[in-house]
Image (spheres, rainbow, N blue to C red):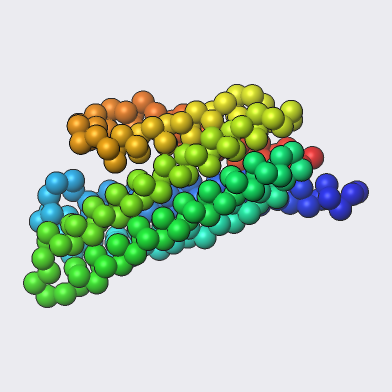
Amino acid sequence: MNEGIINHRQMAKLAGWSLILMAIVAGIGYGYAFGAIYVKGDSAATLSNILQHRAMLPIVITTYSIMLLLDVVVAWALYKFFLQDNPALSRIAGWLRVVYCVWLAVAILQLYYAQDLSAMKGADAGVVMNYIERFLQVWSQGLIVFGVHLLLIGTLACRTAAIPKLISGLAFFAGLAYVGTNILQQSWVGYMLHKATVEAVLSLPMALGELLLAVWLIRKGGK
């Protein structure tokens, strides 16, 4: 078998399994641990949760750090996978995901500050909350870059005949959703009143955008 075909297949499986693992880790870190400590608009309750559930914030930091490493792997693997189809576009998409990783690293750093402060005697709940809110803000900024990356991945997938148009379309839609919702979050204060409703509507198609691509990459990518 041609060595290039083998490498293409390996990149597809590496990207696919990394995306699946990332979804699992995100569910633990954001869906479970972060949700157990963060109370929007209530710094006292948030600090109380951090102190009562001391393992949760370290879990959030650890899982997001794992996600950061997986994002770098996915950026490289998807770049290599789509390289033959469109070198320029795949290179831009890969670098955009790396730029998002830098934003995510800065966001995670805010959680380290929050953890250090919360461990101090007489910790100021407002200051701890400020770092957690800053984590969310910086991450949201990074997700705009991530959304543009997904738009390019959806475009690359659409130009790859073997990938079903449903999958490429969902990836492109997820990119639009990430860009749109996070720009609104950064620029429109009133968006926070509607955020829960918007996320309830868009969360499933946004998740499916990468997950279905991941399944396809594992099963058929590069064959």
Viewer-proximal residue, 208 or 129? 129
For the point 47% across and 44% down, the residue is 146
Residue 129 on image: x %, y %: 18, 57
For the point 71% across and 32% down, the residue is 160
* Image quadrant containing the C terminus: top right
The quarter of the picture where residue 191 lies is top left
For the point 42% across and 36% down, the residue is 178
For the point 19% across and 57% down, the residue is 130
Residue 58 lies left or right of residue 50; in this view the side is right
Residue 159 lies left or right of residue 25; in this view the side is right
Residue 56 on image: x %, y %: 29, 60
Q: Residue placed farthest to the right in the image?
A: 1
Q: Is residue 135 above or below residue 140?
A: below
Q: Residue placed farthest to the front in the image?
A: 88
The quarter of the picture where residue 37 lies is bottom left
Viewer-proximal residue, 146 or 111? 146
Residue 105 on image: x %, y %: 41, 61
Residue 142 lies left or right of residue 74; in this view the side is left
Q: Residue placed farthest to the bottom in the image?
A: 121
The quarter of the picture where residue 107 lies is bottom left
Q: How many marks can you see? A: 0
- The reply to whether residue 71 is visible in this rendering is no
Residue 39 on image: x %, y %: 18, 48
Residue 159 lies left or right of residue 96; in this view the side is right
- The reply to whether residue 138 is visible in this rendering is yes
